[in-house]
Amino acid sequence: MAAEQQNEVKMPQMEENKENSIDESLGLESILTVKSLIIILQIIKDSQQQHGLRHGDYQRYRGYCSRRLRRLRKTLSFKMGNRHKFTGKKVTVELLSDNRHLLLVLMEAERAWSYAMQLKQEANTEPRKRFHLLARLRKAAKHGEQLEKLCESPRVDAKTKLEAQAYTAYLNGMVQFELQEWKSAMESFNKCKTIYEKLASAFTEEQAVLYHQRVEEISPNIRYCAYNIGDQNAINDLMQMRLSAGGGGGMMAEKLEALITQTRAKQAAVMSEVEWRGRTVPVKIDKARIFLLGLADNEAAIIQADNEETKERLYESLLAECRDTIQAVREELRTDQRERAAEGADSGKVSNLQYLHSYLTYIKLWTVVRRNESMAHALQAKLKEPQTDENKRGPRPQDLIRLYDIILQSLAELSSLQGLEEDHTFQKEVALKTLVYKAYRCFYIAQSYVLVKKWSEALVLYERVLKYTREVQSKAKSFNNSLKDLPDVQELIAEVSAEKYSLQAAAILEKSGKTDSVAPSDVFTGPLSDRLDNFRLDPTLLSKQPNLVQFPPDFQPIPCKPLFFDLALNHVAFPPLDDKVEQKGKGGITGYFRGFFGFGS
């Protein structure tokens, strides 16, 4: 207890006040003097969702439990000694007049459980922490048993008693599950499941949702325990649970993947060879055997996936497993090539190991093609839906062009696989598939040109789409099964024909200046001042930003002020003015002095 108190995460007073208000709104500190009533499952689920477990942050939730315990002890004056000495103190039946004493025990169990789950995450890189994990789980189970004993008091209502029993059974099941005591764990989980199912049947649907969710969380653990006990049919149920988005969640998801790998490893001992395109290749690498055995199950799971998110997750899982297998085969191939070079063997013939590598690469590339095609189908459906939110960016044809670029790149790599250069049937199949995806890529390039009103370019691209589809139809007659997993080109031809006619009409209307019926978005592009002579119902004029005039206005040329130059003045001969000019006489020095003193004329 002292060690856990030392590890508490400190928190600002403002956040503690916020937690207090949340707890009071949930009714965690209400006092019932007649019967002690706490809804255990709802309390822990609400606390977990609000304090870190929505994102898998067990450390944050553990800190919340520690602070919650401190506040409860302070409120209830339930002190564990003083600052100098720790004195253990237990909650007894006599204290149950206040239901917050039950919360003390519940929060202690939750704190120990969250610490165990935190250690579970860290034990992936530090295996020694598993011992501490088991100790914390046992501590949580011990607190759960204490809570169950306290709830046996007549002061506690029947619903709280049942919830305490289910909670204790769940914690005991977690301990036994980690210790691999499958039979005991299965009994505990079944007891927990039975109680929650009965509680769900006793209340309304709104109240029963939480209990049904808990039952769904426990079910994968029960199936896993049943399989380890010896029930071989449980593996099928676990494979179906793997299709769900959570796959059991966290610890169960890891164990489920390990179980599937272990099952395939047992079956791989029987598998010795694989046949592909008329050639039988021995498979001696265990990782390749396990992958090839699970390939059919993975493809079936992808087909059965009920939504795009699950399908995308399964595709990514399959591709990751395929890459790891190819890497293992590549390492063996390098060793084999060195040995063959040392022996001087003929390097012209493709070895079995190289052919196996080509087969695995084919699986990877074709999976990439199918994954991108699945994403393209989802984007096509969204592209046809009306756009409701103008501020949110919707799918565009450019997004589909990128997907088809990746598909064509993968098909180009398929045609260059070693060992298949002389397989003319394979090369023709790849060429046929390339034509199909080129047609779709060209179609969406044309769509992107339509959006920017480049009618001529779009029309030329539509003609190229029809050219590709005609080639596909002419070549597909010799391949009966080559188009079964490809998009239907007949639908593309019909869509292109319709688009061509509307495109030609739009181009003619734009050329004649009558673009009113081309696109509704282009009708009211000009300001109101430019179309005063034409009456149109323009709803944008009633919006907050009506397009009335163009501001600032465009510059217009005006005549400048003229400059005048008198060029005739240089050619005018003026008459002599000598007779008009006064002749000054010669006065001599006398006249000088007269003018100097100012008395001369």
Image (tube, helix red, strand yellow):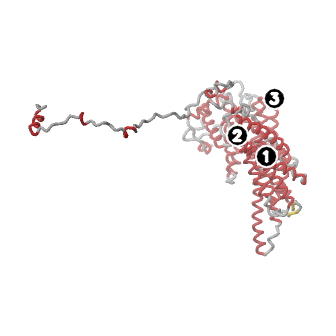
* Label 2 or label 1, whichever comes before in sequence order: 2
- Of badges 1 and 3, the one in the foreground is 1
Q: Amino acid at mark 1?
A: Glu
- Residue underneath mark 3: 202
Q: Position of residue 418 (x, y in %)?
A: 80, 63
Q: Secondary structure at mark 2?
A: loop
Query: Which structural element holds mark 1?
Result: helix
Say which of 358 and 265 sits in front. 358
Query: Measured along the vertical axis of the image, is residue 568 above or below residue 442?
Result: above
Q: Is residue 192 visible?
A: no
User: Residue 161: x, y in percent?
Assistant: 76, 32
3 vs 2, front mark: 2
What residue does disc 2 label?
A: 453
Which residue is at a point 90% across and 54% down the rendered structure image? 478
Is residue 556 positioned above or below 4 on the image?
above
Q: Position of residue 145 (x, y in %)?
A: 73, 39
In the image, residue 224 lies at what x, y percent? Answer: 81, 47
Figure quadrant of the N terminus? top right
Q: Amino acid at mark 3?
A: Ala
Distance CA(mark 1)–CA(mark 3): 67 Å
Q: Are marks 1 and 3 in contact (CB under 8 Å)?
A: no
**Residue at x 71% of width, y 32% of height:** 514
Of labels 3 and 2, earlier in sequence is 3
Query: Which residue is disc 1 drawn over?
Result: 463
Q: Quadrant of residue 512?
A: top right
